Image (cartoon, helix red, strand yellow):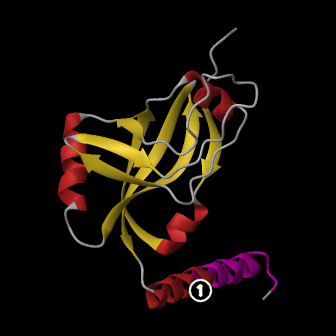
Amino acid sequence: MPREKGRKVIAQNKKARHDYAIEDVYEAGMVLTGTEVKSLRAGRATLTDGFATVDDGEVWLRGIHIPEYTLGTWTNHEPRRARKLLLRKEEINRIASKVKDSGVTLVPLSLYFHDGNAKVELAVARGRKNYDKRQAIAERESKREAARAVGRRDKGMG
């Protein structure tokens, strides 16, 4: 069977981009068991409660839910176990120095297969207050309205 090419998204954390101001984004590999990979290939995972921590020079992904593989036997995995992320030492040091600041956290943005390997898109993010969220929504709406006006003008509709 030929290896798959490209990027196949399994799960996205759309709420993270709303709740956090994204500062940096990293791509990391994941250490998984066989039944976890099979469950991911079936397209089943939840990132909503996920976060990452830096412990003793290693990055661990916690709180994401990969359900048990339905055809698995006693070898099935724990759905919410901590999973080790694979990053370069320089990236880990850079992330660790940023996370030391208060209000900064590591949030998974998406989980996907890239050329057959399971990857997670990890963001160094700062939590937003409610007024920041409203301001971000207002900015997005104004940009969208401006783009619509330009489009209408280009089409000669006003």
Residue 157 sits above or below residue 121 on the image: below
Q: Which residues are magenta?
A: 143-157
- 148 falls in the magenta region: yes
Q: Is residue 93 magenta?
A: no
Left or right: 75 as drawn, with respect to 122: right
**Main secondary structure along the magenta-highlighted residues:** helix
List the residue tagged with mark 1: 142
Residue at 24% of width from left, 72% of height from top? Answer: 102
Residue at horizontal 51 percent and vertical 65 percent from the top: 16
Identify the residue at image location x=58%, y=24%: 116
Q: Secondary structure at mark 1?
A: helix
- Report x, y in % for residue 107: 43, 57
How many numbered marks have been drawn onto this rendered protein structure? 1
x and y percent of residue 97 in the render? 17, 56
Above or below: residue 100 compared with residue 69? below
Q: Give residue 70's quadrant in the image.
A: top right
- Vertical order, 157 against 112 (above or below): below
Nearer to us in this view, 66 or 74:
74
- The quarter holding residue 152 reads bottom right
* Residue 128 percent location from the top left of the image: 42, 79
Using the image as rendered, state which of residue 70 and residue 144 is in the foreground.
70
Three-letter code, disc 1: Ser
The residue nearer to you, when weighing 77 against 146, is: 77
Q: Is residue 109 left or right of residue 147?
A: left
Quadrant of the image for the N terminus? top right
| Residue 55 shown left or right of residue 140 in the figure | left
Q: Which quadrant of the rendered structure holds the C terminus?
A: bottom right
| Residue located 72% across and 75% down the image | 151
Q: Residues within 10 Å of mark 1 (few under 14, many from 20)?
A: few
Where in the figure is residue 8, as x and y percent of width and height?
Answer: 64, 36
Q: Which residue sits furthest right?
A: 157
- Residue lying furthest front: 74
